[in-house]
Image: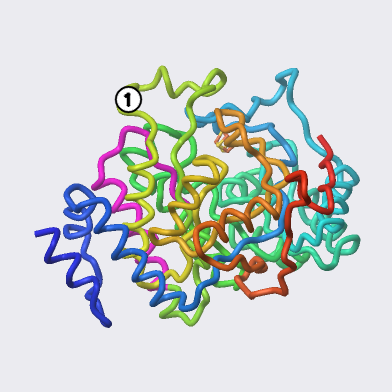
Amino acid sequence: MWRDLLQQQRGDNPPRLSVEDAIVLYDEADFNTLRMVAAERRRRVNPGNEVTYLIDRNVNYTNVCTINCQFCSFYRPPGHDEVYTQTYEEISQRLAELEAVDGVRVLMQGGVNPELPLEWYTGLIEFLRKEHPEIALDCFSPIEIEGIADVCDMSTLDVLTALKGAGMHGLPGGGAEMLVDDVRLDISPKKGSAENWLRVMMEAQSLELTTSATNVIGFGETSEHRIKHMERVRTLQDQSHENGWSGFTSFISWPVQLENNTFGKRNRGNNRYDLGVGPTEYLRHVAISRLFFDNIEHIQASWPTMGLDIAQMAILGGADDIGSTMMEENVVSASGTTKTCALEVELQETVRRAGFEPRRRDSDYVLLDTPHVGLDVQGFPSPPPLQPSK
Ligand code: SF4
């Protein structure tokens, strides 16, 4: 049956994959054939030979959080002696370092900090907008928006409207993890239902904030859970397009990191077995996502969790984007990844060695002029990279 399904997906006008058929492909399709069909689809959706990437920086402005996700080793509860909240000036310094390397976007995310009112966030956005007018400010995530709404007794739509008015460019799709409540409520019981994440995202899209969809796998869920997550994202994307909104720019998935789950409690939760995802399963997930999402243009590879080698395999099997330079990452890396920054030359070399042309983009996937960044005779990037603040 999987052969027939994949054959149908190879045509010029392939039928939309149903949940049931996608589960069959997920569980049964030959790995290499599945990836070949996903690569063909990628070339139809994104013609040409370019793989895009973004020069950006992560900023994790606070680690104070009350949500206590079981897989998270980044957060600290209010009152803990390791809590921090960066000042406007400290955050601005990070953006100055981003400007120095031609960066065009900051992705700023933190915990759900009950001590910060809406005015702190709008003040920050206005300050950064003034100091760094060329940097797109993609900030927070649906659960942070819900946290601000709770603190200020406002609706999430009003919070988003205020942030957009202050100059926020986008709402990244963090915190989606698994949009299936029996998994979600097990791993992050205080994060609320899948419905909340989808509602806040829809509100952001109604305001034409730039949004992306994410998906974390490896909590012990089934392939059916994973496809149902994709179905919820695909349905919201349909609704947004029907409303004339842009919807999600991209779909980004990665495996949960649990090697250093000392502060999170996942290793002691209800489901302590079958955790994590290896490279083959991750690449299968990327390929299925490319075939399933007939309404999301860009599928992104995840080098921070999988490494550049597996990210290279992902762009050969359905992904058309290799993510961003990031410069720092403190949330996922607190639980196990070791690489938190990619140099532009690394992304370019990874893309070239897979047979594609690397191309800079902005947060909205608008293509940008792209210098050829090379290695000097000793194998070091030239010019040498700036060291980010710690
Ligand atoms: S993943 Fe985010 S919401 Fe969950 S505990 Fe960590 S910082 Fe808080």
Q: Which residue occupies 50% across, 71% down? A: 247
Magenta part of the protein: which range?
Answer: 214-239
In the rendering, at what x and y percent does residue 186 appear?
A: 37, 32
Q: Which residue occupies 50% across, 45% down? A: 309
In the rendering, at what x and y percent does residue 264 appear?
A: 52, 23
Residue 345 vertical placement versus 16 (above, below): above
Q: Main secondary structure of the magenta part?
A: helix
Which is more toward the observer, 110 or 318? 318
Q: Is residue 106 visible?
A: no
Quarter of the image with the C terminus is top right
Residue found farthest to the front: 377
Q: In the figure, is residue 129 to the left or right of 224?
A: right
Magenta-span inclusion, residue 229 = yes
In the rendering, at what x and y percent does residue 242 appear?
A: 41, 80
Residue 163 vertical placement versus 272 (above, below): below
Quarter of the image with the N terminus is bottom left
Element type at marker 1?
loop
Graded by Cα atoms within 10 Å as few (under 14), some (14 to 19) or many (20 or more), the crowding at tag 1 reads some
Question: Colour mode?
Answer: rainbow
Image quadrant where residue 64 sits: top right
The type of residue carrying mark 1 is Asn
Residue 47 vertical placement versus 157 (above, below): below
Image quadrant where residue 68 sits: top right
Q: Which residue occupies 75% across, 41% down? A: 61
Magenta-span inclusion, residue 348 = no
- The residue identified by callout 1 is 271
In the rendering, at what x and y percent does residue 180 appear?
A: 33, 46
Q: Which residue occupies 57% across, 42% down? A: 304
